[in-house]
């Protein structure tokens, strides 16, 4: 027969094993809960941008040289005035987090590449622009220097109605969850008003930079 000390040792070992298993299970559950909470927090901070809707309110956009454009009906602006190129896109944030715009990259014509350009190719905005959650704002850019490599091709694309592709880089207000959204602006098929510089705008692609892409 086993003596009392052996039985006590076995009981202690069994209790320790059960406690270890319970602790491991509790730790895994806590880690899982923490990951779920972190994901929920990120979703609450995440912005997603689209072009504004036709029924969204008009917006007045000003440039540093005191040039102004009025965006309405979800239309973008593409103007060449005194050899200066002005662009603006009305934006709607369809997610629950504030969007902070970081930079932009432009191609003339419709860009169909499956990947975006390197982040080093993006131009930073000269001022911070924000798009509130569930609300509208805008992106804007101006090319004034004729020596700028973009000036000539962009001016020609606007004057010939070729269309312009714009990639906008943005993230949440903490600097994370960076995303690139691609927009394409093109002249309207039938222009019957006095604002031919108001162009149609559409959204085509989104790329997630700081997390796995869903596609």
Image (cartoon, rainbow, N blue to C red):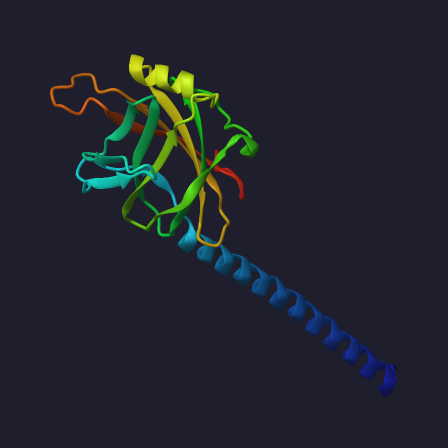
Q: Name the residue located 27 percent from the left edge and 39 percent from the top edge.
A: 61
- The mark tally for this picture is 0
Assign the N terminus to one quadrant of the image: bottom right
Q: Name the residue located 66 percent from the left edge and 70 percent from the top edge.
A: 23
Horizontal side of residue 31 vs 38, given as left or right: right
Towards the viewer: 50 or 80:
80
Q: Name the residue located 30 percent from the left edge and 23 percent from the top edge.
A: 82
Horizontal side of residue 120 vs 192, given as left or right: right
The part of the image, by quadrant, that contains residue 126 is top left
Towards the viewer: 139 or 24:
139
Position in image of residue 179 (x %, y %): 46, 40
The part of the image, by quadrant, that contains residue 190 is top left
Horizontal side of residue 63 vs 168, given as left or right: left
Q: Residue furthest bottom?
A: 4
Q: In this rendering, is residue 103 above or below 146?
A: below
Position in image of residue 54 (x %, y %): 19, 35
Towards the viewer: 208 or 72:
72
Q: In this rendering, is residue 212 above or below 39?
A: above
Horizontal side of residue 162 vs 22, given as left or right: left
Q: In this rendering, is residue 58 above or below 29?
A: above
Position in image of residue 101 (x %, y %): 42, 43
């Amino acid at each position: 027969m086993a003596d009392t000390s052996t039985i006590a040792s076995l009981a202690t070992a069994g209790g320790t094993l059960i406690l270890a298993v319970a602790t491991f299970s509790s730790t895994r559950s806590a880690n899982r809960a923490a990951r779920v909470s972190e994901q929920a927090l990120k979703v609450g901070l995440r912005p997603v941008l689209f072009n504004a809707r036709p029924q969204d309110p008009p917006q007045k956009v000003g440039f540093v040289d005191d040039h102004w454009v009025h965006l309405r009906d979800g239309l973008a602006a593409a103007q060449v005035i005194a050899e200066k190129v002005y662009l603006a896109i009305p934006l709607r944030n369809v997610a629950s987090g504030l969007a902070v715009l970081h930079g932009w990259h432009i191609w003339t014509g419709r860009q169909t590449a499956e990947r975006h350009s390197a982040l080093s190719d993006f131009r930073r905005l000269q001022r911070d622009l924000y798009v509130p959650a569930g609300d509208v704002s805008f992106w804007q850019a101006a090319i004034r220097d004729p020596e700028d490599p973009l000036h000539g091709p962009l001016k020609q694309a606007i004057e010939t109605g070729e269309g312009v592709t714009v990639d906008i880089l943005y993230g949440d207000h903490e600097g994370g969850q960076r995303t690139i959204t691609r927009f394409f602006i093109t002249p309207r098929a039938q222009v019957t008003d006095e604002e031919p510089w108001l162009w149609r705008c559409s959204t085509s692609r989104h790329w997630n930079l700081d997390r796995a892409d869903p596609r």
